[in-house]
Amino acid sequence: MPPVFRPRRFWTSVLWLVFLAAGAAFSCIFGVFAFFTAVLVAVFIGLNEFGRWPYKTNLVICAGTAVVVAVAGIFTWMEITSLFVLFFTMSAYMFYFRDRTSRLIPALETFAASLAKAPDFDSIIENAWRGMQEMAPAAAVFVILADIEGCLYIPDHFGQPGRALKRNGGTPWKVFASGRPINIPRVSTGRDQPLDRDALSLISVPITARAEKLGVLQLEAGTAGAFSEEDVAKLSLAAMIIGQELYMFEASEVVEEEDGVDDPD
């Protein structure tokens, strides 16, 4: 896996420019428009991923190269126009992907802050359920916890009574036992035991903290194939936040109990 934070270096941008010049020259000499298009796409992605120049500068470099080639009469303006359509599509997708990523970080930050401000255990669960429901409004959210004996249960939230989960080999029990997330594109009622009777797909991830199993966080949707592996990763981040807050709350309760025992009054 590449590092999340890595320095952007100037020499990588220079290498991509050299590759652009060589590829454009080769394409113009032999008149191969498809190769010219492939070179521009590769350079545009490479400059944005590895170079230190901003997105607009990289777009101007690649678009300017296309205009120069068109003015020189190497390729027709219709071919260059099709190339601009391709760049517009790529740019729109990159902006969409970047915007989607930028929405995730503030959402998780707000989610973590709401759990940190919760004064008691019930508030943590209610804030966790509310925050998850805001992030996944089209799915059924289940925050499942484990008691001291290792039994799974759904705690009370928003006035709805909690309930214990039978050891029926359903998805929550599988995830809790294995400690690995599960993505089920098409639910089997008999095998997967969804908690929502209308669920057709689900993702389930463990809630852990300091190598301690605390429960399971599960999303269920009424459509098949509703979740991707990216959704599993995002749900795992939310479960990690929940697990940390639950662990810190339990640790603080233990300290308070010990202080109460040691208190001579």
Image (cartoon, rainbow, N blue to C red):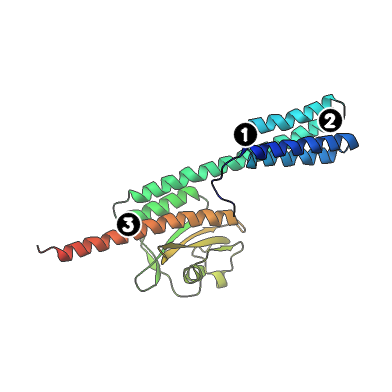
Q: Is residue 225 left or right of residue 129?
A: right
Task: Identify which residue is drawn at 45% across, 75% down.
Answer: 167
**Outermost residue toward the right in this view:** 30
Label 1 crowd (10 A; few <14 / some 14-19 / many >=20): some
Which quadrant of the figure contains the C terminus?
bottom left
How far apart are the alpha carbons under marks 3 and 1?
49 Å
Image side of residue 197 versus residue 53, left or right = left
Q: Are marks 2 and 3 in contact (CB under 8 Å)?
A: no
Q: Identify the residue position indicated by label 2 in the image.
A: 78
Q: Amino acid at mark 2?
A: Met
Q: Secondary structure at mark 1?
A: loop
| Residue that numbered label 1 is attached to | 53
Q: Residue furthest left?
A: 265
Image quarter for residue 98? top right
Task: Tell which circle, 3 or 1, labels the residue nearer the N-terminal end.
Answer: 1
Query: What is the distance, in whole Å, between disc 1 and disc 2 at their CAs?
Result: 29 Å
How crowded pointer 2 is (Cα within 10 Å; few <14, some 14-19, many 20+) is rated as few
Q: Nearer the viewer, mark 1 or mark 2?
A: 1
